[in-house]
Image (spheres, rainbow, N blue to C red):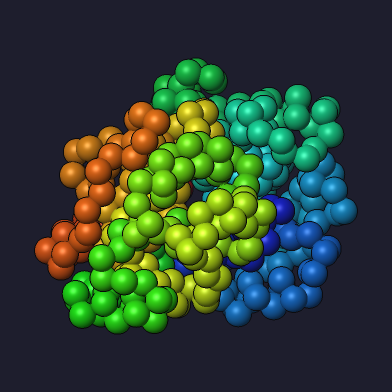
Amino acid sequence: MLIYLTYAEPPSGVFSSQVADVIRYVNRKEQAGIRLLAFISLHDFRSNRTRIKKESPDAIVLPMLPKATYWKFNSLALCLLCLFLRPKAILARNVIAANMALKARKFKLVKKVCFDGRGAIAAEWSEYDVKVVDSWKKAIGDLESRAVMESDFRIAVTEKLVDYWHERYGYSSGQHVVIPCTLNSNFVPRIPRDEEKAAARKSLNLDAGDTVLAYAGSTAGWQSFSTLHRYLEPFLKNDQRHKIIFLSKKEENIEKLSREFPGQILQQWVNHADVPGVLSACDMGILLREDSITNRVASPTKFAEYLSAGLPVIISEKIGDYSDFVRKNDCGLIANGSELPSITGTDEAVRARMIGLVNANFTKEAQAGHYRELLSNLQ
């Protein structure tokens, strides 16, 4: 048996697709025997536990101590569980989880630890206003170094993250696989027809001649709204038929843009199952972020979601491995100036090619070989 350990991560769409769905897929495909162990906040513990158990019925969901900084005490609970469960290895989803797993290995309660690296955490805490005490910010670099250098194996979401490990911590062992953020395994490829696009536009009060961009996700913090605004302002000013749909909860940034460009900004917050229908009304997806280490190593889940709806992507330079992917596969536009490149509509042939790319690169099945390599290294 293997344990997939998460710490301080509540249930969410990302948790569903990148944790619960990965476990289901690998257990079904490879009979891996992975069991989820999630330490979550006491805040809304009961409802969050229910949500996690709904997706992973055999998951063990335990409360954290009130502050994430007390992770060492939760390590004791992990060690006790390892005494009972006797796992071969622990896959640890973030830096703190990896350090907890390394403690269990130190006491010979588990043979191997795999660090599932999701980003450059020390850099992110330095570059953005992460609300933690100063001593915790100073410690995170040491914790990340230990997770990278002392784990037996590693998962990285991008090749750029591996480069970050090498440059910051001297990592060079090559004991890793690169697995990007993937779509849920229940994704069924389907090319939106031109008439479906027209119907979707009509339902949103959009005209056939509108040029419509989609932005999915938050506009706060590291999502770089100032960078986004710099590109969108001339696009919106250029033509009243240029419009943007924000698939986001209401935020002041979006409200401000809507006041600035009345009639050109739409804001929708829909169930995950309804997202493809809204995206089918659009021409391209937006993935514009500022240049930072955090963004240079990132694997944004929205990239695959845009492609899965048949949308090419407008992307900034140096976003994980994906700016190069767009350039290599001609699946969008690189925004590297102060204005967006020329944007045109998408026909069925373009949408079919985008969906082909997502099937070949960003599904669980496309990454099956990497999952097998991972499991073989944890035996």
Specify whether residue 185 is in view.
Answer: no
Q: Residue at x 85, y 48 (%)?
A: 67
Residue visible at 74% across and 76% down? 47
Q: Is residue 231 left or right of residue 270?
A: left
- Residue 205, image x and y in percent? 40, 76
Q: Nearer the viewer, residue 189 or 185?
A: 189
Determine whether, in the image, residue 359 is placed left or right of residue 23: left
- The quadrant in which residue 59 appears is bottom right
Question: How many marks overall?
Answer: 0
Q: Residue 86 appears at what percent x and percent y?
A: 63, 58
Does 163 appear above or below 94? Answer: above
Q: Position of residue 266 (x, y in %)?
A: 49, 65
Q: Is residue 283 visible?
A: yes
- Image: 319 above or below 280: above
Q: Choose between 24 and 336: the one closer to the eye.
A: 336
Q: Quadrant of residue 37?
A: bottom right
Q: Which residue is farthest right?
A: 66
State the image coordinates of residue 202 (x, y, percent, origin top left).
34, 80
- Asked if residue 307 lies left or right of residue 266, the reply is left
Task: Out of 91 and 254, give the one closest to the viewer.
Answer: 254
Above or below, comparing residue 323 to residue 194 in the picture:
above
- Residue at the image point whose x is 83% and y is 27% from the top: 135
Quarter of the image holding residue 155? top left
Instruction: Residue at 86% x, 54% y: name it.
Output: 65
